[in-house]
Image (cartoon, grey):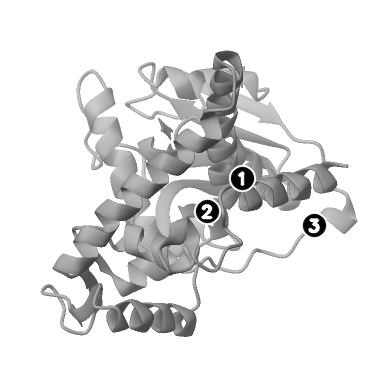
Amino acid sequence: MEIEELRAFNRTVTERIGALEDRYLNTGRSLALDRLLWEIGRDGADVRDLRDRLGLDSGYLSRQLRALEGEGLVVTVPSPDDARVRRAELTDAGIAEVGVLDDLSDDLVRAILRPLAPRQRAQLIEAAGTVRRLFTASAIEIGVVDPADAAARFAVDQYFAVLATRFDAGFDAGTTRAARDDEMRAPHGTFLVARLKGEVVGCVGLKLHGDDPAEIKRLWVADSVRGLGLGRRLLAEVEEAARAAGAPAVQLDTNRSLTEAIALYRSAGYREIPPFNDEPYAHHWFEKPLQPAEPTERAQPAEPARPAERAEVAR
């Protein structure tokens, strides 16, 4: 029933917005080409970023760009920062065309809303916002990476930067308890990175301690994806990794200023315990017992997620 309802939703939306038409908004181009113009935008974009953002195959994207170049709307040039990187930029005609597309898109939205009563309009706008957030949440991918990977380094740097702004007395990475790479690398632990369209938006680490409780470290979620449930999802994934490794429980420490993290832990079944370490920035210590994993549930480690660059906080 869930699948049928969502497929019916997809059919209704694609039909109503004209996604099935060869000439979207009567421009003479498909929706795919118009969307590519929007994504390039007035500031231009690296081709590899376009590929990640839109989830397109390299060959298909190249053909789309050539079609827009043939219309005189786009040029592809070397990036000024790195000549090996191709960059797509709008021509003057392309910039003018994006303005036309914006006007036509506004007209389409008005046509959709016009037949509806005020209450129906409000319902549609609210529902659209909910759908957009949930679609975004479902597009976030979580994978195991080596703690020394560039994506992991980027995520931890972002995590430390947030701590520095949130802690009352600031934060110095040199004085916090260490979580070395080899402690969060199989078989001693794991490190997970979350990505949205290639952008790093979250992370969490795990240190295993044999028959003792495992320790969760570096739980961080980017501001750009707050409210999408990623923090809870990362927590659940790292708990499962600890369970699969045979840990009887998971523990963590956190600072009193991280009120959202504290609320997350309590709602996820963590109970406050006496200090189990000497972390100088910690005010609260939590633990959650884990049910032993069934033998058939012991999954092999996930394949490393592909590298990228970019990333709520919680220790």
Q: Nearer the viewer, residue 298 or 308?
A: 308
> Three-letter amino acid code at disc 1?
Val
Could you tell me residue 104's position as x and y percent? 38, 48
First along the sequence among labels 1 and 3: 1
The correct choice, above or below, for 13 with respect to 282 in the image is below
Q: Which residue is mark 2?
A: 192
Q: Are marks 2 and 1 in contact (CB under 8 Å)?
A: yes
Image-quadrant location for residue 172: top left
Quick one: SS at disc 1? helix
- Label 3 or label 2, whichever lies nearer to me, is 2
Q: Is residue 77 above or below residue 213?
A: below
Q: Nearer the viewer, residue 200 or 263?
A: 200
Q: Secondary structure at mark 3?
A: loop
Question: How far is disc 2 from disc 1 in space, using C-alphas?
Answer: 8 Å
Query: Residue 190's x, y, as percent?
Result: 55, 55
Q: On screen, 133 above or below 76?
A: above
Q: Is residue 210 visible?
A: no
